[in-house]
């Protein structure tokens, strides 16, 4: 395509967006049920994550062991998620989600029992972390793809994606704060027990949801044809699609490579809290502060009327995140940390949600589950690699120097992405035009006459 051709945004009706705002999505009964159940469940999940990280560092006093326990729940993503994406494309997504929610409830119940009865050991935390990681590997890409099944109208999809991001950040605001209070008041085990009970509402909501869409079927294929193909062949199709589609491939690679250095700071927060002589409440407040920034970024993204221009937001947020992480390496107080972490949370969400929105918009429907599994793998799976390295570094050179190295690393990755962006935009334009997101000026003039 001639790169000199000028493009403009398609009219609002061509973008497939309604005029009633993102909250109109709650008119969809299925989505409203899903949102309500997930709200309760995610609050419990965030409570467990905060309580577990605090508990681990308290009993080990080792940044590296903190990283090992954290990585145990994330490393399985690297190996399992690609296959989980295939299942998300060929099986009933609702049934898959119900099964993994039951398994997650069992994992949380075991963790609560071992902690409350004072039988828990570090190897228990690692083993249950691996179990939780396998569950999450199936849960996250399937839930991402399931959102598409919940909306009846194309114009509701951007609102559903925006509200999903809002859901994640509101619960990340509430859960850590509650966890800090509960750990300080009645102990860590109660957080794990509350999380176990939090799965009941989402499982109940899923049983009330009825969708008409068949997951993973190409318009020209029958369900029997899809089931006859092997899992490995389906995985290869998805990997080939991502490998050959620059608009998808480059975003996923950037998110994964950036996350190796960018996500380590969250794992090291308990170390920072001990450094400033804080307690579990301090950790909860700091994580909630990060969530406030993420929520603000989500609302900013929700106000957009098109995915056009989101690549610029990815670039800006990547650079800003890197600089803020370098600044955080010099912070030694609670309130400065709150401010910096809120800004870091905003940048992280701008980057991740922008990439998610672009992928959800341009990806082919019959490959959605596999692409979203790779997206989730890049976001969640790369983090433990960086966390283990950061934990080992923090043991040897200290927290501040480790955060500084992570910030410089992210800055280098951001520069590489920025330099590759013009070619990405050139190759993505035809897809945007095909989706009705852009119209060539010449075509617009012909249509006008």
Image (cartoon, grey):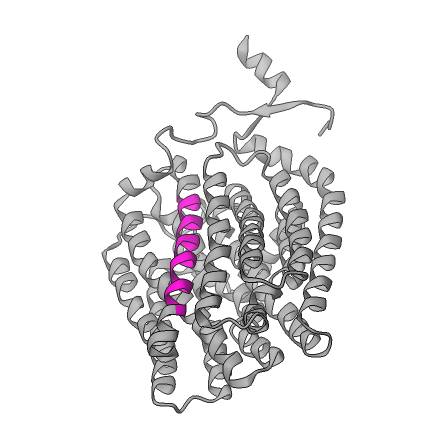
Please give the name of the residue rendered at 51% of the width and 56% of the height, measured from the top-left corner: 290
Q: Is residue 23 above or below residue 34?
A: above
Give the percent coordinates (x, y) of residue 24. 32, 37
Of all residues, the one furthest to the top in this rendering is: 449
Q: Quadrant of residue 401?
A: bottom right
Judged left or right of residue 116, residue 291 is right
In the image, which residues are magenta? 160-180
Please give the name of the residue rendered at 40% of the width and 40% of the height, measured from the top-left corner: 159
Judged left or right of residue 43, residue 323 is right
Q: How many marks?
A: 0
Residue 349 visible, this angle:
yes
Give the percent coordinates (x, y) of residue 25. 33, 40
Give the percent coordinates (x, y) of residue 366. 48, 50
Please give the name of the residue rendered at 46% of the width and 86% of the height, measured from the top-left corner: 124
Between 419 and 434, the one lying in front of the other is: 419
Between 218 and 259, the one lying in front of the other is: 259
Q: Is residue 89 above or below residue 152?
A: below
Between 162 and 154, the one lying in front of the other is: 162
Give the percent coordinates (x, y) of residue 52. 46, 75
Magenta span contains residue 152: no
> In the rendered image, which quarter contains the C terminus?
top right
Residue 103 visible, this angle:
no
Of all residues, the one furthest to the bottom in this rendering is: 119
Q: Is residue 234 above or below residue 281?
A: above
Magenta span contains residue 172: yes
What secondary structure predominates along the stretch shown in magenta? helix
> In the rendered image, which quarter contains the N terminus?
top right
């Amino acid at each position: 395509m001639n790169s000199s051709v000028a493009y403009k945004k398609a009219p609002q009706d061509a973008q497939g967006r309604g005029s009633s705002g993102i909250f109109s999505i709650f008119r969809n009964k299925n989505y409203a049920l899903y949102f309500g159940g997930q709200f309760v469940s995610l609050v419990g999940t965030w409570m467990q994550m905060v309580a577990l990280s605090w508990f681990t560092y308290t009993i080990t006093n080792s940044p590296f062991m903190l990283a090992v326990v954290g990585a145990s729940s994330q490393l399985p993503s690297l190996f399992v998620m690609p296959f989980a994406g295939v299942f998300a494309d060929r099986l009933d997504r609702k049934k898959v989600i119900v099964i993994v929610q039951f398994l997650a409830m069992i994992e949380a119940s075991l963790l609560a029992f071992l902690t409350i009865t004072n039988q828990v050991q570090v190897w228990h935390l690692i083993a249950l972390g691996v179990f939780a990681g396998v569950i999450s590997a199936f849960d996250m890409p399937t839930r991402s793809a399931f959102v598409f099944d919940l909306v009846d109208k194309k114009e509701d999809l951007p609102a559903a994606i925006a509200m999903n991001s809002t859901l994640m950040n509101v619960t990340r605001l509430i859960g850590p704060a509650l966890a800090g209070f509960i750990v300080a008041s009645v102990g860590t085990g109660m957080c794990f027990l509350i999380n176990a009970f939090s799965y009941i509402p989402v499982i109940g909501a899923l049983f009330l949801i009825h969708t008409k869409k068949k997951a993973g079927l190409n318009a020209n294929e029958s369900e029997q044809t899809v089931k006859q193909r092997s899992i490995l062949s389906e995985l290869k199709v998805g990997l080939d699609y991502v490998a050959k589609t620059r608009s998808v491939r480059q975003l996923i690679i950037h998110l994964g490579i950036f996350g190796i250095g960018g996500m380590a700071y969250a794992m090291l927060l308990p170390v920072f809290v001990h450094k400033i002589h804080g307690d579990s409440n301090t950790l909860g407040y700091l994580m909630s502060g990060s969530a406030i920034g993420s929520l603000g970024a989500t609302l900013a993204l929700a106000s957009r009327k098109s995915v056009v221009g989101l690549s610029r937001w990815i670039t800006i947020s990547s650079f800003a995140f890197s600089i803020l992480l370098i600044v955080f390496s010099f912070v030694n107080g609670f309130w400065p940390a709150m401010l910096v972490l809120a800004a870091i949370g905003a940048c992280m969400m701008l980057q991740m949600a922008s990439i998610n929105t672009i992928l959800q918009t341009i990806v082919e429907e019959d490959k959605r589950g596999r692409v979203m599994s790779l997206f989730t793998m890049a976001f969640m799976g790369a983090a433990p690699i960086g966390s283990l390295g950061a934990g080992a570094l923090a043991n040897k050179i200290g927290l501040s120097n480790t955060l500084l190295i992570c910030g410089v690393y992210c800055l280098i990755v951001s520069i590489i992405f920025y330099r590759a962006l013009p070619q990405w935009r050139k190759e993505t334009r035809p897809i945007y035009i095909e989706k009705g997101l852009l119209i060539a000026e010449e075509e617009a003039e012909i249509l006008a006459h």
